[in-house]
Each structure stands twice: as structure tokens, then as C-alpha cells.
Amino acid sequence: MLNPGDEAAPGTPGTGDDICPECHGKGRIGGAPCPNCGGGGVITRAIGGA
């Protein structure tokens, strides 16, 4: 499942997990799940120009 902050699907070659820049890894903003990471605190980013 992709969240708005993900650059690719989890497990895609050339990607890795990164701390969500919106909630700073907490998974929540103002008592609600972070809309950027879906409440997980991490997003999937491309690594090395992937």
C-alpha cells in the first residue's frame, strides 16, 4: 500500500525506508495518524538516483 509520502512501493529495488519528514517518525500529527506516512512513521524513498 502506498502512502502519499512514498516515492515507490515498499520492496522496490533501489528504495529504502526513511523517517517521515512530516511527523518526524512519530506516525501522528495532532493526535491523528500522519497523512503523509499513514501513521507508520516511515516512507519509502528512492536511493542513489533510482
Image (spheres, rainbow, N blue to C red):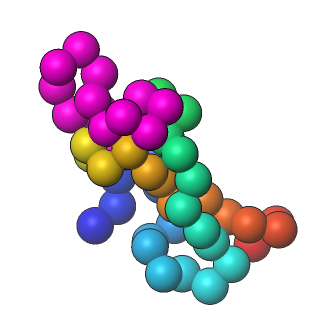
Which image quadrant is residue 16 in? bottom right
- Horizontal side of 19 relative to 1 (left or right) equals right
Q: Is residue 1 toward the left or the right of residue 25 in the image?
A: left
Q: Quadrant of residue 33?
A: top left
The residue at 17%/20% (across/down) is 31
Instruction: For residue 4, say whether it is visible.
Output: no
Q: Is residue 29 left or right of residue 21?
A: left
Look at the image and say whether residue 3 sits in the magenta stretch.
no
User: Residue 7 occupies which quadrant of the picture?
Assistant: bottom right
Which residue occupies 68% across, 78% down? 14
Magenta extent = 23-37
Q: Residue at x 53, y 45 (%)?
A: 19
Q: Position of residue 44 (x, y in %)?
A: 52, 60
Residue 39 visible in the shown view:
yes
**Residue 30 x/y as whole percent:** 24, 14
Relative vertical location of residue 9 with respect to residue 18 in this rendering, above or below: below
Most extreme residue toward the top, as rendered? Answer: 30
Toward the left, the furthest residue is: 32
Q: Position of residue 24 (x, y in %)?
A: 49, 31
- Compared to 10, does 33 lie above or below? above
Residue in the image at 67% along x and 64% along y: 46
State the quadrant of the C terminus.
bottom right
* Residue farthest right in this picture: 48
Query: Which sits in the foreground, 22 or 5?
Result: 22
In the rendered image, residue 3, in percent from the top left (x then y), is placed at 35, 52
Q: Is residue 32 left or right of residue 7?
A: left
- Magenta stretch mostly in which secondary structure? loop
Give the tally of numbered discs. 0
Quarter in which the N terminus is drawn: bottom left
Q: Say whether residue 31 is magenta.
A: yes
